[in-house]
Amino acid sequence: MKLKLPVLVTALLTGLLLNMSAMAADAEAYKSALAKAQETICDADSRAQLWTTTDDLLKDAEKAAASGDFDGAIKMVNEAALHAELAVATAAKEKQIWQKGVPK
């Protein structure tokens, strides 16, 4: 029985270290996704087209990351980035077609 205890402890510690390593990788993936999203969000904001849903998604993503739910946080950050990309596309389209809306 004494020989099995060190093996059990080693297995538990290995599992704990692997889990911590995975969490660190998830945290880095979240930070990377957030950085990419923030670039697009700044672009949309500079064009005065930022959607109102973007800030809420980022706040929810921050809460999820703080609680360790990095998968959920990354999904929310990616959703915020998508909203920003669509806002940028809207701004580009509006820039092209605004003249058609001016009465003659």
Image: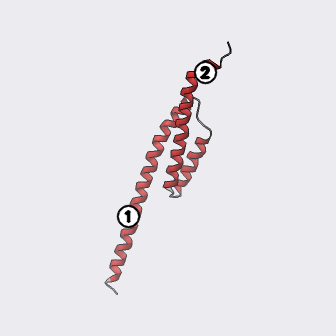
Circle 2 packing at 10 Å, graded few (<14), some (14-19), many (20+), is few
SS assignment at label 1: helix
Vertical placement of residue 53 versus 29, above or below = above
Vertical placement of residue 15 versus 75, above or below = below
Comes first in the chain, label 1 or label 2: 1
Circle 1 packing at 10 Å, graded few (<14), some (14-19), many (20+), is few
Q: For this rendering, which residue is in front, 82 or 100?
A: 100
Spatial CA span between label 1 and label 2: 55 Å
Quadrant where the N terminus is found in the figure = bottom left
What percent of the width, then of the height, locates residue 72?
52, 54
Residue position marked by numbered label 1 in the rendering: 18
Vertical placement of residue 8 versus 74, above or below = below
Vertical placement of residue 2 versus 94, above or below = below
Q: Of the numbered discs in the image, which one, if any, rests on residue 98?
A: 2
Q: Amino acid at mark 1?
A: Leu
Residue at horizontal 53 percent and vertical 58 percent from the top: 67
Residue at horizontal 53 percent and vertical 31 percent from the top: 89
SS assignment at label 2: helix
Q: Of the numbered discs in the image, which one, if any, rests on residue 81?
A: none
Q: Quadrant of residue 21?
A: bottom left
Residue at horizontal 51 percent and vertical 57 percent from the top: 69
Please identify the residue farthest to the right as the structure is shown.
103
Q: Is residue 8 left or right of residue 67?
A: left
Whether label 1 touches label 2, CB < 8 Å = no
Q: How many marks?
A: 2
Q: Nearer the observer, disc 1 or disc 2? A: 2
Residue at horizontal 61 percent and vertical 18 percent from the top: 99
What percent of the width, then of the height, locates residue 104?
67, 12
Please identify the residue farthest to the top as the structure is shown.
104
Q: Amino acid at mark 2?
A: Trp
